């Protein structure tokens, strides 16, 4: 059997320059492939749909980095670009009882009813943003002017963040997800984000409002309250997970539709639903390209490969979405295919808490955008990738209404 000793790892491009091509190469190597993360850290990328689904729910796999010798024994490079995914003690880095406690508290504060109640506000915000776009003459950059402010505003309101500097929030959050960040940048962004959110939590503790932060502070499960650190980490998780992903879902859907006018016409004629567009975008261009990290708590055999206890795993969502073994004609965007059972919101205990909100936001945004600008068209090639293998999207989407 092959192991990490017998295989040479393929370096993963930290700039995510051509994720789909890189993923095709990795998929061809088998269901898991040994890759090298920034800083020369090895990990097994899980790129086949079925294997990913299995391992995401496998009790021999944990998200707790304290079970990763490389981290626990202090062997990670100083100022590692991905440090944010291991050194923050929250939902995304805990498993078992601790994870259930942290997640249950957040779900209590993010009930389907709370999410459904946001619909009118999301419609209103969307309409305002479209008014602003309509007032602009000529071309506009849709990512900055539409795809970004909507989810950020929604998540900021959900968390009860005051009208703070949204550009600062966006820059810090981008840095946290940037696998090509310069040494030290991630840690600095993390500290600044903690300071910003900590101040908000403090204010809410003194004067609670009708928002998720106040609910997190007040929430109890079996009498257990969140610690101050856990409140801030949960705010950070929800803030970053809640907008960085939805921006890219909206951006990737607009991009796919504008590249295929016939398909767009069928959606506009009502032959294909917006929900189908959203699900197909999630499969075809998973907004989360790959998510760090998981760890084997026992040896795990996958096909011809033996993943050994203590080794790191990377959930390769974008690769799984284009797995030809799972989806016919996987490299083609086709909203008419039977609803794809993609894994782009994860699977198992860490399944995305915000999937319902993301779907609702994207459907509202896309249907309103194309209703307001039925002749929307790209004015420049949208090909510049976000410099991260965690996020899968483009940096700019220039378009015009006519
Ligand atoms: C298109 C939009 C979104 C996508 C593609 C997405 C994707 C994901 C994925 C793949 C995971 C699992 C990560 C892993 O462990 O491998 C996840 C977890 C999570 N997502 Fe989302 N997400 C989206 C929107 C949102 C929104 C809007 C929120 C919040 C309101 C949110 C909150 C979370 C949280 C809190 C977790 C961690 C759950 C846990 O560890 O138990 N996400 N998301």
Image (tube, rainbow, N blue to C red):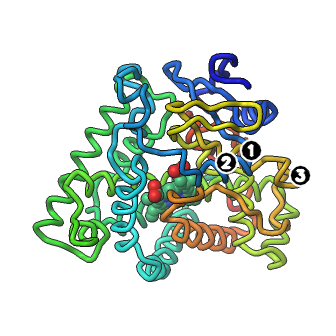
Mark 1 and mark 2: Cα distance apart in space: 6 Å
The residue closer to the viewer here, 170 or 193, is 193
Left or right of 148: which side holds 191? left
Of badges 1 and 3, nearer the viewer stands: 1
Q: Position of residue 352 (x, y in %)?
A: 52, 60
User: In the image, is residue 253 above or below residue 357?
Assistant: above
Figure quadrant of the N terminus: top right
Q: Residue at x 68, y 61 (%)?
A: 401
Question: Can see residue 146?
Answer: no
Left or right of 186: which side holds 222? left
Q: Residue tagged by mark 1?
A: 48
Q: Are marks 1 and 3 in contact (CB under 8 Å)?
A: no
Q: Residue at x 55, y 66 (%)?
A: 355
Mark 1 and mark 3: Cα distance apart in space: 15 Å
The residue closer to the viewer here, 202 or 100, is 100
Circle nearer the N terminus (2, 3): 2
Q: Locate residue 160: give its quadrant.
A: bottom left
Classed neighbour count for the residue bearing mark 2: other residues with Cα under 10 Å, few (<14), some (14–19), many (≥20) = many
Query: What SS does tag 3 mark?
Result: loop
Q: Residue tagged by mark 2?
A: 52
Classed neighbour count for the residue bearing mark 3: other residues with Cα under 10 Å, few (<14), some (14–19), many (≥20) = few
Mark 2 and mark 3: Cα distance apart in space: 20 Å
The residue closer to the viewer here, 208 or 30, is 30
- Kindly identify which numbered label has been placed on residue 329: 3
Query: What SS does tag 2 mark?
Result: helix
Q: Position of residue 204 (x, y in %)?
A: 18, 66
Q: Is mark 1 within 8 Å of ligand 1?
A: no
Left or right of 143: which side holds 90? left
């Amino acid at each position: 059997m092959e192991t990490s000793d017998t295989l040479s790892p393929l370096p993963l491009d930290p700039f995510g320059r051509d994720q789909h091509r890189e993923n095709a190469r990795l998929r061809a190597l088998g269901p898991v492939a040994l890759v090298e993360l920034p800083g020369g850290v090895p990990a097994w990328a899980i790129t086949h749909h079925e294997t990913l689904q299995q391992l995401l729910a496998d009790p021999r796999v944990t998200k707790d980095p304290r079970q990763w010798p490389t981290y626990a024994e202090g062997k990670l490079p100083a100022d590692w670009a991905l440090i944010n995914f291991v050194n923050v003690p929250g939902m995304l880095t805990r498993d078992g009882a601790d994870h259930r406690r942290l997640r249950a508290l957040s779900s209590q504060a993010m009930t389907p009813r709370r999410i459904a109640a946001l619909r009118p506000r999301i419609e209103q915000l969307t309409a305002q943003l479209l008014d602003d776009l309509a007032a602009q003459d000529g071309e506009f950059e849709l990512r900055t002017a539409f795809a970004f402010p909507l989810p950020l505003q929604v998540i900021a309101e959900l968390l009860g963040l005051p009208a703070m500097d949204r550009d600062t929030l966006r820059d810090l959050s981008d840095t946290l997800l940037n696998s090509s960040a310069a040494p030290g940048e991630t840690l600095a962004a993390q500290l600044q984000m903690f300071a910003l959110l900590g101040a908000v939590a403090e204010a809410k503790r003194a004067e609670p409002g009708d928002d998720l932060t106040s609910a997190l502070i007040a929430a109890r499960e079996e009498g257990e309250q969140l610690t101050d650190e856990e409140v801030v980490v949960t705010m950070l998780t929800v803030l970053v997970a809640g907008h960085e992903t939805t921006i890219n879902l909206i951006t990737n859907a607009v991009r796919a539709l504008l590249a295929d006018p016939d398909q767009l016409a069928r959606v506009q004629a009502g032959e294909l639903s917006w929900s189908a567009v959203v699900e197909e975008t999630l499969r075809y261009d998973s907004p989360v390209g790959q998510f760090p990290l998981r760890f084997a708590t026992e040896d795990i055999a996958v096909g011809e490969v033996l993943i050994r206890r203590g080794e790191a795993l990377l959930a390769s969502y974008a690769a799984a979405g284009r797995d030809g073994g799972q989806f016919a004609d996987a490299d083609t965007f086709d909203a008419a295919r039977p609803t794809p059972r993609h894994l782009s919101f994860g699977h198992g205990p860490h399944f995305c808490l915000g999937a319902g909100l993301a779907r609702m936001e994207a459907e509202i945004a896309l249907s309103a955008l194309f209703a307001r600008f039925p002749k929307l068209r790209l004015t420049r090639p949208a090909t510049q990738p976000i410099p991260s293998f965690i996020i899968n999207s483009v940096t700019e989407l220039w378009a015009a209404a006519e």
